Amino acid sequence: QGQLVESGGGLVQVGGSLRLSCTASADSIRINYMGWYRQAPGKLRELVAVITSGGRTNYTDSVKGRSTISKDNAKKTVVLQMNSLKPEDTATYFCNAFIWNGMRWGEYWGQGTQVTVSS
């Protein structure tokens, strides 16, 4: 119930690209927003990008201009495309969403997917 399944992390070279995907479970009746956070070792979790049900987006400054977040409402999926990757993008990336499951609104998190940018 309210599960988020992530895919797309891995090892990428500096300057490369990656595509992170997150799909909400079938019982997600309404999704207010979906987004991505990341957490590097020894650092706080930070917002990377978010997209609302109306399509409004917001990005952290460090990824603006080289990242795009998009969604597919029918598939209940959000995709984060990141380009020109830097070593400082290395972190565990977590999908996050605010979902109505027919009984209540709740905030949900994915299990996390590791992104490592190597030089």
Image (cartoon, rainbow, N blue to C red):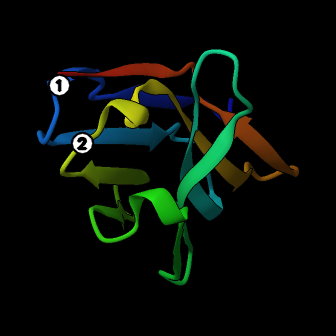
- Please provide percent x and percent y for residue 81: 26, 52
**Location of residue 15 by image quarter:** top left
For the N terminus, the image quarter is top right
At a point 30% along the width and 71% down the height, the residue shown is: 65
The location of residue 25, given as percent across then percent down, is 53, 37
Q: Report the residue marked by disc 1.
A: 12
From this viewpoint, which residue is outermost toward the front?
119
Q: Residue furthest right?
A: 104
- Left or right: residue 40 versus residue 43 is left
Seen at 40% across and 36% down, the residue is: 89
**Amino acid beneath label 2:** Leu
Front-most of residues 40 and 8: 40
* For the residues bearing labels 1 and 2, Cβ distance under 8 angstroms: yes
Q: Does 95 sit above or below residue 81?
A: above
Looking at marks 1 and 2 on the same chain, the residue that comes earlier in the sequence is marked by 1
Picture layout, residue 79 above or below residue 64:
above
In the picture of the structure, the residue carrying the numbered disc 2 is 85
Q: How many marks?
A: 2
Q: Nearer the viewer, residue 24 or 13?
A: 13
Q: Label 1: how many residues lie within 10 Å, few (<14), some (14-19) or many (20+)?
A: some
The Cα atoms of the two marked residues, 1 and 2, are separated by 8 Å
Looking at the picture, tell me which residue is in the foreground, 84 or 35.
Answer: 84
What's the residue at 18%, 50% (across, down)?
84
- Kind of element beneath mark 1: strand
Density class for disc 2 (Cα within 10 Å; few <14, some 14-19, many ≥20) is: many
- In the picture, the quarter occupied by the C terminus is top left
| Residue situated in front as seen by the camera: 56 or 115 | 115
Q: Is residue 47 left or right of residue 54?
A: right
Q: Secondary structure at mark 2?
A: loop
Amino acid on which disc 1 is placed: Val
Task: Indicate the position of residue 74 as horizontal and vertical percent values.
Answer: 36, 62
